[in-house]
Amino acid sequence: MTIEQPTQAALDEEMRMMVAPRNPGHVPPSDAAFGQTAATAPQYQLRAHPEPPPVPNGWYAICGSVDVASGQVRSVIAVERELVVFRDADGVAHVLDAHCPHNGAHLGGGEVVDGAVRCPYHGWRFDGSGQCVEVPYSDARIPAKACIPSYPVREQDGFILFWFHAQGAPPAFEVPPTEEVGHPDWSEPYEFRFELVAALQEMGENNVDYAHLCYVHGRESVPNDTSVFTTEGPFSTVVETLPDGGAFTRHAWGPGVALLRVPGITTVLTTTTPIDRRHCRLHWHFLFPKAMEGIANDIILGFTGTFGLQADVPIWRDKVYVERPILVKADGNIAEFRRWYAQFYE
Ligand code: FES
Ligand SMILES: [Fe+2]
C-alpha cells in the first residue's frame, strides 16, 4: 500500500534541491547566493571539511521485495557502488556489482536468461554468485577471472537486504524477523521512501540525541532521564518515555535496519541505505494495528512531516561531520552510541 503524501509536491521540490548533483558546471541564478550553504552552492570551492566516515559494515536494503519481479534485473546505487539486483528463475534475489568483468558494460541494461543475468554488450551470463556461466560465442573454457563480486542476500519482511563488508567478510549477524509482518491483527505495510543529504552515522546518532528534540522537533523542554540506550553486540535499543507517559522502543539491527515500536500505535520497520558518504535512501514500512488504520496517514506524517523527519533534513544537509564533538554530560548517549557504532568500521 502506498500512501498519498499531501505535501508531496513540496517534498519533491525540496528533494530536487537537496539531491541536485554537485556539478561544477551548474550555475544557479545569481540572486540565489544569499542563504546558500556549501551543500546548495556547488559552484564554489570552499575549504574542505572532514569527510564523513566510510560506509559501515552491515545489512542494507537494496530495494523492496515488490521492486524486482521474477526474471527482472534492476540497477541500484548504494554503498558507494553501482550494483544490480535480479531474481533468478526461482524468484531468488541476488545482488552483484554492476559492471561486467569482460569489458565493463553495465549489467542493469541486460536481462535474466535461464536464471543468470546476461550482459547487454556481448551476452556473457553470470549467475547469482557472480560466476560467469556462459560465453555464448566461444568454445574455449570460461576464464577463471570471469566473476563479479556478489553480496549475501536475505529477503525478509518485504525487503531485499544485502550484506556489505568493506573487506568482503561474511555476515557477522542476522536481522531478526518482525513479528507484526503478515500477522492477521496488523495492516499491510504502508510505504515511505525518501532520499536525502545525510551521513548514515549522523542519522543514527540523531536517535540518541535528546537535546535536539527540543530545538528541532518542538518538544517543550529537553527530555531529562527519559531515555535509556543499551547495546548488545551489533544490536542497540533506545527506550524513550514520551511526555504522555507512553514509551517507544527503537531496536537497531546494525547500522542499516531498525525497528520502531510505539505500542498500540504503529510498528515501523526502517531501512536506511547509504548511497555514498553524504547521501542516504530511506525505505520504511509502517504497520498498524487494524484499529489504527483509519488514521494511518496522520501517524505517518507525524513521523515524516514537519515535526518529524523533515525537521532534521536541513540540519543533516548543512552540518559537517565532527570527529570529536564537544559533549556535555547530558549528551552522554552520543558518546555511547559512537562507541557502539565503531564496531561497524574496519
Ligand atoms: S562487456 Fe559484458 S559481455 Fe562484454
Ligand atoms: Fe531528529
Image (spheres, rainbow, N blue to C red):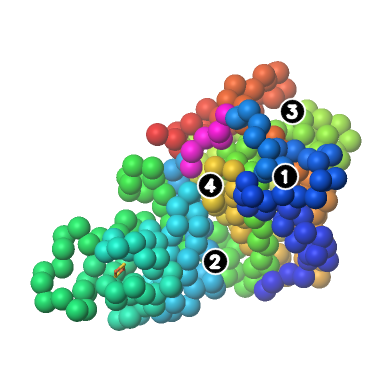
Q: Quadrant of residue 38?
A: top right
Tell which tag, 3 or 4, sits nearer the viewer.
4
Query: Where 57 falls versus 326 (above or below)?
Result: below
- Please state the quadrant of the image where ligand 1 appears: bottom left
Residue 225's disc is 3
Q: Position of residue 148 (x, y in %)?
A: 30, 59
Circle nearer the viewer, 1 or 3: 1
The amino acid type, in three-letter code, at marker 3 is Asp
Q: CA distance from mark 3 to mark 4?
A: 35 Å
CA separation, marks 1 and 3?
37 Å
Query: Of residues 207 and 324, which is closer to you in this image?
Result: 324
Task: State the image quarter where residue 268 is shown.
Answer: bottom right
Give the magenta range: 50-55
What's the residue at 30%, 81% (across, down)? 114
- Please tell me whether mark 1 sits on a helix, a strand or a loop: helix
Please give the name of the residue rendered at 64% of the width and 22% of the height, measured from the top-left corner: 325
Left-right relation of 2 to 9: left
Q: Pointer 1: what residue? A: 40
Mark 4 secondary-structure assignment: strand
Mark 3 vs 2: CB contact within 8 A: no
